[in-house]
Amino acid sequence: MNIQVWTDTGLHGAGSALVLKLLYKDAAAFNINDVSEYTFTGRFKGSLQTLAHYDRVFIVDLDLTPEQIKLADRGNVVIIDTHKNHIKNKHLYSKAKTILKGYPDHSYRSTIDLIYDKFGDHLLHLTDEQLLLIEYIGTYDWYNTQYKESLKLNAIYYNLNSPKTEKFISAFSEGFREFTVHEKNAIRLYFKKFKEQIENSQVFKGKIKDYNVVATFANYAVAELAHFLINKHTVDIGIVVNPEAKTVSFRRSKDCDVDVSVLATKICNGGGHAAAAGGKLTEKFATLTKQFIQC
């Protein structure tokens, strides 16, 4: 069987692709493409001529727009995702098989968990180390800091050269293990740069509706920075703007009930999950945050 996977760039996307590779361990061909929602369209269009060569084409952990859904809706495609907007648009598929679950059903926390739950009966051969790796990656997707290993795995992924996802899968296909000297150095470098970013960040405070918000600019360790600022300033929402990529990331505190995916959709033409979301840097966002004051 020939398998192709399209997955989100990031640790959680790599983890989802890894579980699928473990599921199809005897596949004759297993092709991986790591993309973002913004690069998916161009890359997928470029592959249309070869798409029929694959028995199954998995598109996982990508919050596809209605236009992208139309492009991806093909008979050999399997869609697996937990993003809210994607779930709402499930009815737009007519040919592809869809496994779309998440909010308001809280049973599935991340795409890697959804894949394992769906295909768990065919993954009984996994070792304890492989199951542990899946758990660590799944908790990072929701930035659950219960496991420091999750943060370290993300640091290792971030510091890999392209193709990151293939290299990560190759390094951890046997499951979680002791980090190599090179990986430990990558972790130290990641958090050193993260500390420098904290020290050099310009931080702004404001309100969106009744919620207290803190915001900053960064292109590195975005999730870590957002949660650090939320905890330091005791606010409801953390926003990180990447001026280079022209993107905006939203995170909420563990005690806040706001759905940041709604904010990302309304003001940044984006989407995501209730606790973590993102979108594009828009005029609407710039206007809304003009009233923010630098700390």
Image: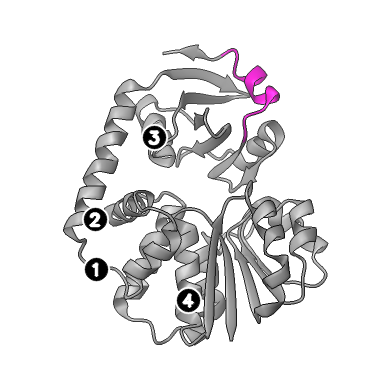
Disc nearer the start of the sequence (2/4): 4
Disc nearer the start of the sequence (4/1): 4
Q: Residue at point 39% right, 25% down?
A: 233
| Quadrant of the drawing holding the C terminus | top left
Label 2 and label 3: CA atoms lie apart by 21 Å
Q: Nearer the viewer, residue 295 or 17?
A: 17
Amino acid at the residue labelled 4: Lys
| Label of residue 87 in the image | none
Q: In the rendered structure, are the residues bearing label 2 and label 1 in contact, judged by CB atoms less than 8 Å apart? A: no
Disc nearer the start of the sequence (2/1): 1
Disc nearer the start of the sequence (3/1): 1
Q: Residue at point 73% right, 51% down?
A: 65
Front: mark 2 or 3: 2
Front: mark 4 or 3: 4
For residue 52, which quarter of the picture? bottom right
Disc nearer the start of the sequence (2/3): 2
Residue receiving disc 3:
225
Label 4 and label 1: CA atoms lie apart by 18 Å
Q: Residue 164 appears at what percent x and percent y?
A: 42, 57
| Label of residue 177 in the image | 1
Q: Is residue 112 left or right of residue 59?
A: left
Amino acid at the residue labelled 2: Glu
Q: Which residues are magenta?
A: 280-291
Q: Is residue 77 visible?
A: no
Label 2 and label 4: CA atoms lie apart by 23 Å
| Quadrant of the drawing holding the N terminus | bottom right
Q: Up-down: is 100 above or below 283?
A: below
Element at badge 1?
Answer: loop
| Label of residue 183 in the image | 2
Element at badge 2?
Answer: helix
Disc nearer the start of the sequence (4/3): 4
